[in-house]
Amino acid sequence: MIMLDTNEGYEDAKQNLLSRIENTPEHLAEGKELYGIYCAVCHGSKGDGQGILMTREKFLGVPSYVDREITPGSVYHVLMYGKNAMGSHAGQVNATERWQIAQHVMELRQNLIKK
Ligand code: HEC
C-alpha cells in the first residue's frame, strides 16, 4: 500500500493500514517509553490532551484521544506526516517505533473509554 500525505491518504491508512508488528508486552513497553519522550509533553501521559505544554498554555488544541476516531493505521499516518498543528515525527522515530507508539496510543484510548 502506498501511503500518501493527503486527506485521502489519511483516510486510507485509517481504514486499511494494518500494523506490521504483533501486539506484545515488549512492543507495548517500548511504545510507552517512546511516547513518554516524544508525545506526553503535549498529549499527557494518559492521552487526555493535558500534557505539560498544554497545561502551561505553551501549546493549544491538543485533543484527548478519546475524542478522535483513531486506528493504529491513522496514528501511523499522523506520525509520518503530522496533522494540522501537530508536526511529523518521521525524523524522530522509525517505522517499528511508530507501530510501537501506535499500540500504546490505542491502549491509552481504550483506558480513557473505560472511565
Ligand atoms: C507539540 C505538541 C504535540 C506533540 C509533541 C505531539 N502531538 Fe499529537 N497532536 C497535537 C495536536 C495539536 C493535535 C491535533 C491536530 C488536529 O488538529 O487534528 C494532535 C493530534 C494527534 C492525534 C489525533 C490525530 C487524528 O487522527 O485525529 C494523534 C493520534 C496524535 N496526535 C498522536 C501523537 C503521538 C503518538 C505523538 C508522539 C510521537 C504526538 N502526537 C506528539 C500536538 C502534538
Image: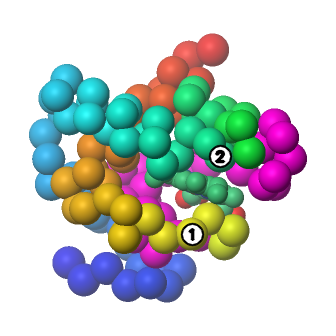
**Where on the picture, by quarter, is residue 54?**
top right
What's the colour scheme? rainbow
**Residue indicated by mark 2:** 42
**Location of residue 27 with respect to 14 vertically, above or below:** above
Image quadrant for the C terminus? Answer: top right
Would residue 84 be counted in the magenta stretch? no
**Front one among 100 and 94:** 94
Q: Where's residue 77, x and y in %?
A: 40, 67
Q: Residue at x 17, y 28 (%)?
A: 26
Any part of residue 105 in sight: no
Would residue 71 be counted in the magenta stretch? yes
Within 10 Å of disc 1 (Cα), the crowding (few <14, some 14-19, many 20+) is few
Instruction: Indicate the amino acid at tag 2.
Output: Cys
Q: Residue at x 57, y 69 (%)?
A: 87
**Location of residue 88 with respect to 115 vertically, above or below:** below
Q: Where's residue 53, x and y in %?
A: 74, 45
Mark 2 within 8 Å of ligand 1, using the beta carbon: yes
**Residue indicated by mark 1:** 87
**Location of residue 55 with respect to 58 vertically, above or below:** above
Q: Where's residue 18, x and y in %?
A: 23, 56
* Distance of label 1 from label 2 (alpha carbons): 12 Å
Q: Residue at x 66, y 72 (%)?
A: 84
Image quadrant for the N terminus? Answer: bottom left
The range drawn in magenta is 54-83
**Front one among 104 and 69:** 104
Instruction: Indicate the amino acid at tag 1.
Output: Gly
